[in-house]
Amino acid sequence: MAHAYRPLQESSASGGDSGEFRLIELRRGASGEPIVCKLHHYPLDQAPQYDAISYVWGDPTDTREISSPAGSKQITNNLHSALQQFRHPDRERLLWADAICINQADIVERGHQVAVMRKIYNGASNVLIWLGGETGTDEDAFGAIDILNEKLPLEYGLLQETRANVSMADINAAGQFLSKPRWQALGRLFENPWFSRVWVIQEVAYGKDAMVFRGSRSVSWTIFRSVASRILGHHLSNWLEASQPDAMVDTLRHISTVMRRDIAFQNDFFKMLCLCRTFKSTDPRDKIYALLGMSTDPVARRIRPDYTKDITSVFVEFTVADMTAQTSLRHIIVAPSYARSESMDLPSWVPDWTQAPAAMNFDFIATYRASGDVPPRFSVSRDGRVLYVTGKHLSSPAKIGKTISEIQAVNEHLNATGQQRQPTFKWIYDWLTDCHGVAFGENVNISRDFCDTDEYTAFLKALCCELDYDVSTPPFDSYLRSIRYMYRHAKTLLGLYNPDATLQSDSYYNVASVFSQQVLVLQRDVLNSVLLKRFCRLATGQIGWVSPDTRLTDTVSVLYGCRHPLVLRPVDEIHVKLVGDCYFQGLMDGQALRSNSFSETEFKIK
């Protein structure tokens, strides 16, 4: 007989401030015996001591049966293995696990229980973080945590210096703390899908105490997070040999800074969503609902989890509510993404929170003021599909370049087809040559004299979005000089490089040494910012960067109250859709709105 749930009483009936919830009474049993349990109802504010399980559901088709007086129930194999591990052999145990304690078939109950999830985890004596059953590398992984917790200093850099002064010698010395198998085992542990699940942020942040379990091995969350923070702070993530290095760095950063009660932007739910955008959820609506309990933002506090609403409605309603409350168009900047879900049919100006951003938008690079101090003027159609917003149409692209990734792919293809190896300086030279062609035309001669002109200096400033990151960045003139010489040195290296030689000439290595230092500057301040963007020249002459999907038939406009110019695409005679934000030199500080050359327009964005 299938398990039958007795309805939970709401707060008005139970007298508790949040109504009832269920707890699992896990019956005692030896290892391998069938799981037997019983569900009990308690007022949330009068519950006995219990522990809450934080886990990943796993494959929904891979299930095991548990039994109770109310009937049998199928649960995922991952939760079943957790119950096997957490069951006591000699006494009953009270636990909370969402797949069992919430009637998942009752969407009204599900919404109510999600709304009090923070209280459920905060009321637990312990949070049991379950990373799955035992594997052959667990001993190495947990041994690595013990060693790093003991030997790796808390301060940045083994020399107790600032992060900027950590040397490669420090990094290599720290790497020797562990054997290669232990680093690899620890890397596999950090790649566990639990770390990418959006619900775990709240579950860990509001638990009184938490333990990390992998099979029978365990370590406190405090130590686990501390080790992750130190690996990140000491620049040791490469030792973990992750299959996706960037994702590994994100995981370490999330463990260190996001999965905590004092998470940033608690008073600004939009910024919290941006911070947690790469986390995943089975139900897309949970990208918003899972974070509500952590926010003090009035907009978030008015949202009630409601699983009767479709995904599109949830995303659109939050966007409109936040734009109205903040009198801001900031959602537009983060709306473009790699692969917007067609099934959701979201308007182009509404972020798809289930997807990562299409490319680093310029809001994360610097604070610009393309619309100056002019406040936004916008409204939304009754059906929430069309954003009516006032601004100025500026121009259209006249020439668009290649992305860095496209140029790198050409060189990788040459390698794969057996042609001569293309060193780093080759694709950098090709990329800079492509940018030159966009800015100055295909036949321009980038001579030494031309590189010293004001026109070329303006090009270099556009290349790096005229950024001056922080106090550790070289003076801007010195920085521009480094980028200017890098192209010249790359061209020299092309002439000196012998693809058939095992060792290159002394002249090659002398130039390569200087070039490598210039590349480090470029990597930090340019490549990371514009990796997936295209260099572009407008018909009106301005040069800068546009989104990778930009076409020559698109238009560039500035909307009142929006900090960046935007690329818009006509979809019919009346409407346009958002392609992405952009940077153009001479348009980032309100110049377009102060000019009489551009007329005011109402844009209808679908």
Image (cartoon, rainbow, N blue to C red):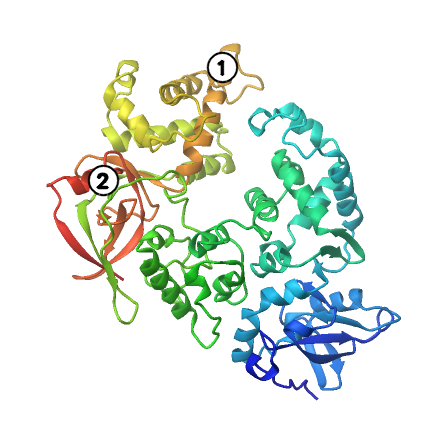
Above or below: residue 389 compared with residue 182 = below
Q: Measured from the top left, where is residue 153 in percent x and y?
A: 70, 33
Q: Amino acid at mark 1?
A: Tyr
Residue 481, visible in the rendered structure: yes
Above or below: residue 215 compared with residue 168 = below
What is the quadrant of the C terminus in the image? bottom left
Residue carrying label 1: 508
Q: Is residue 545 left or right of residue 163?
A: left
**How many marks do you count on the picture?**
2
Image disc number at residue 590: 2
Element type at mark 2? loop
Residue farthest top in this picture:
506
Crowding around mark 2 (Cα neighbors within 10 Å: few <14, some 14 to 19, many 20+) is many
Q: Is residue 512 left or right of residue 17?
A: left
CA gap, disc 1 and disc 2: 46 Å
Residue sitting nearer the eye, 64 or 595: 595
